[in-house]
Amino acid sequence: MSKDFLRTAISAARQAGAVHKKYFNTKFKIRKKSTSFDLVTVADIEAEKKIVSVIKNNFKGHNFLCEENKYAPRESEYTWIIDPLDGTNNFASGLPIFSASVALAKKDQLIAGAVYDVTRDELFYAQKGKGAYLNGRKISVKKISNLQEALLITGFYYDRGREMFENLEKIKQFFLKRIIGLRRLGSAALDLCYVASGRAGGYWEFELSPWDFAAGALIVSEAGGKVTARHGEKFPLGKSPIVASNGLLHKKMLKIINS
Ligand code: IPD
Ligand code: CA
Ligand code: CA
């Protein structure tokens, strides 16, 4: 596989991080999308433009699946899946937990991905079959097999409907299993990278878009973990629930999530 794929993903994610840095904690306009919880800022828009231009400079005819804009389909088996700013609510509140996420799929297979957190200067990346890395250091999932040893992460989609209340019930069930703790950090891409790097044992969320999880899912798999849809099946590169773990906790997590 072309080394340039990963290099391009990394360069694009880093340059999006520079855009985040430029606007973070400054006065910028915040626009509401469909619901009052779903926001978009100038940083989302500018970072996406930057990422797309970096990729187009390297690869002319590829497809793009981006959060903020639609791009005309091309005759190519390659699709870049991009979240220019994952964690917009945190960003807009001045909370330094957000990232840029850039992934590349060949047909329906993820082959490269990079997630960059400019606030900590942490770059997570992976290439299919080549392992996962954080700032050049190989990472792997945490080898624990009991929920009692696990720090878990979850997230809530912007919808405040049935799925949110269902998740609150699941959280209760996880606490009854005496997990160490539960976090809701607000950037799905980073949540996944934290599973990959052993900072958390597992992560789940009931509805995500492909740009939220594409890069992170590859990074978890390449770090030795497991990522599936809600019932343990392969996740599509479309809207999907996502369950990610170190592998050893996966069945236990699925059992509670589907009980
Ligand atoms: C959101 C974040 C959040 C997750 C939401 C996502 P955005 O992405 O990843 O952690 O819980 O489901 O939509 O809107 O900040 O790019
Ligand atoms: Ca997102
Ligand atoms: Ca986003």
Image (spheres, rainbow, N blue to C red):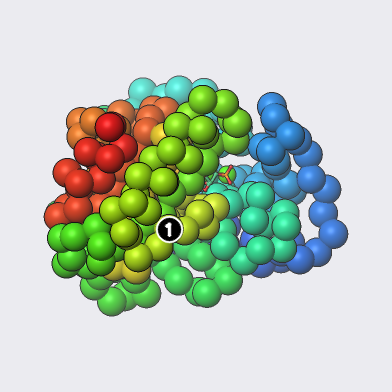
- Judge left or right: residue 127 versus residue 122: left
20 lies left or right of 180: right
Q: Give how far across and how far down residue 24 sits, in percent.
A: 71, 64
- Determine if the C-beta at disc 1 is less than 8 A from ligand 1: no
Give whichever of 18, 198 is nearer the camera.
198
Residue placed at 51% from the left, 33% from the top? 165
* Residue closest to the eye, 176 or 246: 176
Q: Residue at the spot x=85%, y=59% of the render?
A: 27
Q: Is residue 115 above or below residue 104?
A: below
Q: Position of residue 90 (x, y in %)?
A: 64, 56
Number of residues whose C-alpha sits closer than 10 Å to that of mark 1, classed few (under 14), some (14–19) or many (20 or more): some
Residue under the image location 54 percent in, 52 percent down? 186
Q: Which residue occupies the foreground of this view, 83 or 142?
A: 142
Could you say which quadrant of the image residue 197 lies in? Answer: bottom left
Residue 254 in the image: state x and y as whole percent: 24, 39
- Residue 222: horizontal and vertical position, in percent? 21, 56
Mark 1: secondary structure: strand
Does residue 68 appear in the picture of this structure? yes
Vertically, is 239 above or below 149? above
Quarter of the image where the C terminus is located: top left
Q: Badge 1 is on which residue? A: 182
Which residue is at a point 14% across and 55% down the rendered structure image? 248
